Structures are given as structure tokens and as C-alpha cells.
């Protein structure tokens, strides 16, 4: 069916798997907060924990997974590790996800009734 379309292109299996893994890792609100903070500049675990309103041990675990997925990178300075977003692709990916969420929220609010609906109790 699609073979007749000369511009039709499907990603290969490895690309699909890696993209799905990245999206899976981004499905956690704490990870989104951590990544967004890292897009503002590098930071350490303690600061990220405060910004994400999470325990430092949880933030460390999230960072380890994000680092393995290539979404963040670390830089050691003495006994501290400073993290940053891996590259500009991470910024675009996260920005698009948040932009999309903002538009979903606005679309839902636009479809909501103008006046609250009250039910008898």
C-alpha cells in the first residue's frame, strides 16, 4: 500500500527502539523536572533534588538512567559531579513535549463549559 509512495520512509528497528526508550525515560515527571533544570545550566544532585522536590537518592537514580540513555552527561570536579543535558536535541525534545502538553491543556480548557456544572447532592 505505502510502497507506491516514493517519499514514504520508515525508521529502522534500532531507531524505533532507541526513540521508544527515550520516551519511556521521559514519562516520569521528576525526570522532566530534572532535565528542564539541566537545560538551564549544569547542576549537582543536591540542587536538582531541591528543584525537583525529590530526595537526593531518587534524583541520583534518575540521573543514572538518564545518563545511560545519553540524555544527560556528568562532569566530575573533586568529589562533586555536575550534570548537564547531553545536547541540543534534548532541549528540542523536551521543549516540544512541554509545548504539546500546553496545547493539549489549552484545547481541553477551550472545550470546557463556560460556567461550572453543578450536580445535586
Image: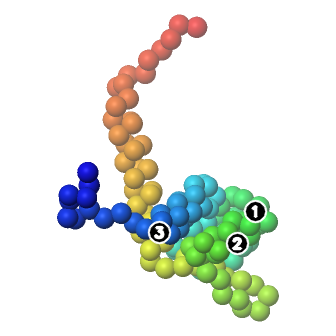
Residue 108 in percent (x, y) is at: 39, 36
Residue 48 in percent (x, y) is at: 67, 69
Query: What residue is shown at x 52% (from left), y 73% (from top)?
Result: 39
Query: What residue is shown at x 36% (from left), y 63% (from top)?
Result: 10
Earlier in the chain: of badge 3 and badge 1, it is: 3
Res 44 label: none
Tell me if residue 102 comes above or below residue 45 in the rendering: above
Q: Could one spot residue 79 in this view of the protein?
A: yes
Q: Quadrant of the C terminus?
A: top right
Measure how far apart labels 3 and 1 are at the Cα level: 29 Å
Measure how far apart labels 2 and 1 are at the Cα level: 10 Å
Q: Badge 2: few (under 14), some or many (20 or more) residues near its Cα, within 10 Å? A: some
Earlier in the chain: of badge 2 and badge 1, it is: 1
Q: Which residue is mark 2?
A: 64
Earlier in the chain: of badge 2 and badge 3, it is: 3
Q: Quadrant of residue 27?
A: bottom right
Q: Nearer the viewer, residue 63 or 19?
A: 19
Q: Which residue is mark 3?
A: 15
Q: Could one spot residue 33 in this view of the protein?
A: no
What secondary structure is marked by label 1?
A: helix
Query: What residue is shown at x 69% (from left), y 77% (from top)?
Result: 44
Tell me if residue 73 comes above or below residue 48 in the rendering: below
What secondary structure is marked by label 2?
A: helix
Res 58 label: 1
Label 2 or label 1, whichever lies nearer to me, is: 2
Q: Residue furthest top?
A: 120
Q: Quadrant of residue 99?
A: bottom left
Measure how far apart labels 2 and 3 are at the Cα level: 22 Å
What secondary structure is marked by label 3?
A: helix
Amino acid at each position: 500500500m505505502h510502497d507506491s509512495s516514493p517519499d514514504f520512509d520508515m525508521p529502522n528497528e534500532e531507531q524505533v527502539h532507541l526513540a521508544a526508550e527515550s520516551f519511556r525515560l521521559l514519562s516520569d515527571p521528576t525526570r522532566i523536572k530534572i532535565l528542564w533544570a539541566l537545560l538551564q545550566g549544569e547542576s549537582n544532585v543536591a540542587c536538582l533534588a531541591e528543584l525537583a522536590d525529590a530526595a537526593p537518592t531518587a534524583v541520583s537514580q534518575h540521573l543514572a538512567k538518564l545518563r545511560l540513555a545519553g540524555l544527560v552527561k556528568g562532569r566530575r570536579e573533586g568529589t562533586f559531579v555536575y550534570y548537564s543535558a547531553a545536547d541540543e536535541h534534548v532541549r528540542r525534545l523536551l521543549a516540544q513535549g512541554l509545548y504539546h502538553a500546553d496545547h493539549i491543556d489549552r484545547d481541553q480548557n477551550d472545550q470546557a463549559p463556560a460556567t461550572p456544572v453543578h450536580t445535586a447532592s
